[in-house]
Image: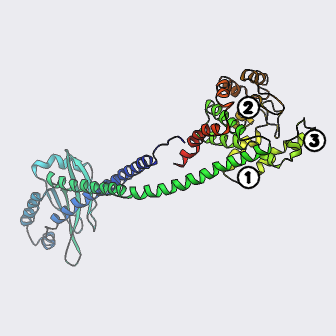
Amino acid sequence: MIATADPRQTLRRRLLWVGSLTAMLVGLFTWYTESERIDEKVLALAVTVAHRISPETLEAHAHGKRDTAALQKTVEEMTADHFGIVELYDRDQQRLIEYVPPALEALEAELKQSGHVELADTPRYMKRLVQGRFALVVAVPITRADGEIVGYLEGVYLPDPETLAQIQWDVLRTVALVVLAIALTTLTVYPVVLALHREVLARSRSILKGNLELLEVLGSAIAQRDSDTNVHNYRVTLYAIALGEAAGQSAAEMRHLIAGAFLHDVGKIGISDTILLKPGRLTPEEFAVMQTHVSLGEAILRQSSWLLQARDVVSYHHEKFDGSGYMAGLAGEAIPRNARIFAVVDVFDALTSRRPYKAPMSAAAALDIMRRERGRHFDPVLLDLFIPLAPALLERYGSADETTLRQWLLPALERYFMRDAG
């Protein structure tokens, strides 16, 4: 048989593709979730700084028991911890202090257009990009030890570039570790998957080989009953492959065509020898019995889902393009194309083969007869495709023995059946 593509390369490519896609998707998801955590980390830093406001000092200020100088100083000191703008509110959300450094007045004006963060019993924030800088507008409740809220801090937290870069680097490192883990997992499971693939492939090829042998056995059985050998089955299958390829059949259609060519007359197993082997012309009654080999063939195929792929040829290869054939009386393209292909090559082989009652015809003589049936018996398009192929096909296969024909057929079986198992 001809060599096929290394299944390990196919498996390696598939694992690489799946691993890469998985790494990309998981990496993107990790990047998204970790990026969301940037906001949380920055918020945590902001909350830590905000807690420098003493709830007792804020409460005393709200009740007029302490001047604003100490509280104002604390607020100004917070700017050293990256709080650029600070507003303090009492428990009734009335503003007590607002501090805006002169250098940030333009930034504060821009932020006012975005509105305020809601003052609530839990920290709230909104993310903004202002004047090319990342800013987090936060609102943090200030509570006593017993949990009672005594006021609120609203501010603009401006993390320094180094801190933000470190956080982003942590995110990138996490994503890289996730992607690396997936890549290592893919490399680790490759030998295991390859071993399993080999086992499945070996079993699949074994089953497929058995099915192909079944085609040969059934075809041989009817050939022997019909006082013939496998020569006809092999030759007509080779002709069908050539015409099918010329007609642009898909790989699946070619498999069905090959199976049908092997089994086209399988129903003749159920025809009695007195009719099947009768040397003279059949009577109308005998011919009616002979026609039943089509339905008998269908019944045989139904016993195997794998053999059913031969149904189009077995059931319809005696149909004629003008509708005068049997058993269904189909016409034109209502006849499955595989059956129309087989009808052409089957008649050509019959005309150019030696029979007990006739000598073989030349390719030219056989094609002259077939041209007269163009559009009646045969699909004209398929016949036109076959005519230029026929002389070379007959020259190569016409006088070859059974062993040689089988050797020529094996590469096609490998190409259309065994590669799919790989």
Identify the residue position indicated by label 2 in the image: 349
Q: Quadrant of residue 142?
A: bottom left
Q: In this view, does 421 lie to the left or right of 211?
A: left
Q: Which residue occupies the foreground of this view, 264 or 392? A: 392
Q: Can residue 167 be seen in this view?
A: yes
Above or below — where is 370 with respect to 297? Answer: above
Q: Name the residue: 79% across, 25% down.
A: 373
Q: Which residue occupies the foreground of this view, 257 or 207? A: 207
What is the distance, in whole Å, between disc 2 and disc 3 at their CAs? 27 Å
Give the percent coordinates (x, y) of residue 318.
79, 37
Above or below — where is 82 with respect to 120? Answer: above
Q: Which mark is residue 302?
A: 1
Structure colour scheme: rainbow
Mark 2: few/some/many CA within 10 Å (<14, 14-19, 20+):
many
Q: Determine whether label 1 and label 2 are within 8 Å by CB.
A: no
Q: How many labels does the image show?
A: 3
Give the percent coordinates (x, y) of residue 16.
38, 49
What is the distance, in whole Å, between disc 1 and disc 3 at their CAs? 27 Å
